[in-house]
Amino acid sequence: MTLTVRKKIFISMGLLVLIIGGAHAVTKQAYMDSLFDQFRKEEIDASYLNALPREQIEILKTYVSSKMKNFLLGNWVFFIATGLLFSLWISGLLTIPLRKLVTAIERVAQGDLEVNVPVQSKDEYGKVIQTFNDMTLRLREAEEARRRLVADVAHELRTPLSIM
């Protein structure tokens, strides 16, 4: 099965979401565990132990909520930055064939018809590169036919002129 560029992007982004989601879940769980240990050490005192269960829950909720705001903000900044860097890397990786093709097109524009870009995939880029290679082959053949025609015409014109 040939993977299209769209499918490659979809798979890459799906993997990124899974990796970041899993890492977020693991770090959040680890942070929550450390937060409860910290609560046990810092906040459990006589006032907490003498409070009603409903009040104890509120004290715990307030403590956890205040600590989690900074963690979640930092965590999301880290994961967004990681996602953007991963996206930049994937986009660079997926556009390598296109950059090679652009370089070859620039060479053809400068008159170099001997350009041949290696086809390394069977996706859309591979098809475009193969079509480009076929086009440059046809351009070379047309240029060779033009040169032969000019040489033949020049020869045919020189022969009668030399007799005269």
Image (spheres, rainbow, N blue to C red):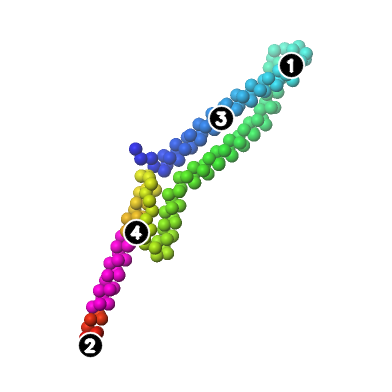
Question: Is residue 49 depicted above or below 162 in this figure?
Answer: above
Q: Earlier in the sequence, mark 1 or mark 4?
A: 1
Magenta-tinted stretch: 138-156
Circle 4 crowding by C-alpha within 10 Å: few under 14, some 14–19, many from 20:
some
**How far apart are the alpha carbons under marks 4 and 2?**
42 Å
Residue type, mark 4 in image: Thr
Mark nearest the camera among 2 and 3 is: 2
Q: Which mark is residue 136?
A: 4
Q: Which residue is mark 1?
A: 44
Question: Foreground residue, 61 or 130?
Answer: 130
Q: Is label 1 in a helix, a strand or a loop? A: loop
Mark nearest the camera among 1 and 4 is: 4
Question: Foreground residue, 46 or 40?
Answer: 40
**How far apart are the alpha carbons under marks 1 and 4?**
79 Å
State the residue at coordinates (71%, 20%).
39
Does the CB distance between marks 2 and 3 fall below 8 Å?
no
Q: Is label 2 in a helix, a strand or a loop? A: loop
Q: Is residue 155 magenta?
A: yes
**How far apart are the alpha carbons under marks 2 and 3?**
90 Å
Q: Which residue is mark 3?
A: 23
State the residue at coordinates (35%, 55%).
133
**How far apart are the alpha carbons under marks 4 and 3?**
49 Å
Q: Is label 4 in a helix, a strand or a loop? A: helix
**How far apart are the alpha carbons under marks 1 and 3?**
31 Å
Q: Which residue is mark 2?
A: 164
Residue type, mark 3 in image: Ala
Residue type, mark 1 in image: Ile
Question: Foreground residue, 26 or 57?
Answer: 26
Circle 2 crowding by C-alpha within 10 Å: few under 14, some 14–19, many from 20:
few
Quadrant housing the N terminus: top left
Mark nearest the camera among 1 and 3 is: 3
